Amino acid sequence: MKPLAIFGGTFDPIHIGHLSVAWEAAELLDAEVRLMPASVPPHRLPPTASAEQRVNMLRAALSGQTRLTLDTRELDRSGPSYTIDTLHEFRREFGDRPLVLLLGADAFAGLRSWYRWRDLFEVTHIGVLNRPGVEACIPVELERAVAPRRTEDLNIIRAQPAGRVVELMATPLEVSATRIRELLAAGRDPRYLLPAGLFDDSALLAPYRESFGH
Ligand SMILES: Nc1ncnc2c1ncn2[C@@H]1O[C@H](COP(=O)(O)OP(=O)(O)OP(=O)(O)O)[C@@H](O)[C@H]1O
Ligand SMILES: O=C(O)c1ccc[n+]([C@@H]2O[C@H](COP(=O)([O-])O)[C@@H](O)[C@H]2O)c1
């Protein structure tokens, strides 16, 4: 069955690194991919842009194609966006369809700090996207937990609803939202690190300029 892949993030703002790895994951897995902005990201400072502003940027970024879509369900819940709760919702909605949670290598390396992280494997596969330039050393306890779940066989991901971990080798792009916020705050124009549809719309990028007094 065609998997449903879920790519959660703060997307503050969405950038070409996100889009490119999401697109390549869609191709590798032959999956529908949903980009899912977090309302209150559990393990970081509040985003610079509001949820509404981040969604507007995502909409602009995703226009003109249908393979990557937007899922705003976490914005409808109050409190922290715990991924396990969201995945249970997806599971109820999609029955036995394979679900794949897409995580950059840095996010995967920090999985042990997530709320009920071991339960994630009951509900979803995990697709790990390589990411250059970030610390992504996998702690021993995490590797011990995931080693028996690892597979390189994408047919297994399509044949089972959950429980496996697959590395997805996407083209490495050393781009981060932090860097883009820094450039915008410094009055620079990170035009080609941003999706078309964002960089010509100064209103969409205003939160990053205004928050630093530019
Ligand atoms: N360039 C990239 N390559 C691969 N994965 C990425 C890349 N940028 C972000 N990701 C992944 O996308 C998900 C959402 O990331 P997020 O929205 O926090 O972006 P970010 O660029 O890491 O932001 P920030 O710099 O604010 O921490 C995470 O799983 C992260 O690892
Ligand atoms: O569920 C958790 O405890 C948890 C802890 C940290 C991050 N997450 C999710 O991981 C995704 C990426 O988060 P971030 O902070 O790297 O943008 C996003 O969907 C978050 O909601 C989830």
Image (spheres, rainbow, N blue to C red):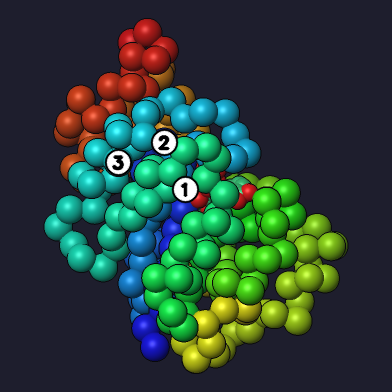
Q: x%, y% of residue 40?
A: 50, 37
Q: Nearer the viewer, residue 186 or 82?
A: 82
Q: Does residue 34 appear to the left or right of 168 in the view shown?
A: left
C-beta proximity under 8 Å, tags 1 and 3: no
For discs 3 and 2, the disc positioned in front in the rendered view: 3
What residue is at 20 percent from the left and 25 percent from the top?
Answer: 203
Q: Which of 148 and 85 is in front in this view?
A: 85
Q: Mark 1 points at which residue?
A: 9
- Marks 1 and 3 sit apart, C-alpha to C-alpha, by 11 Å
Q: Residues within 10 Å of mark 2 (few under 14, many from 20)?
A: many
Tell me the CA gap for discs 2 and 1. 8 Å
Residue 123 against residue 116 in the figure, above or below: below
Specify the amino acid type for callout 1.
Answer: Gly
Q: Quadrant of the C terminus?
A: top left
Q: Name the residue under label 3.
A: 55
Element type where label 1 sits in the image = strand
186 sits left or right of 105 in the view: left
The residue that label 2 is drawn on is 12
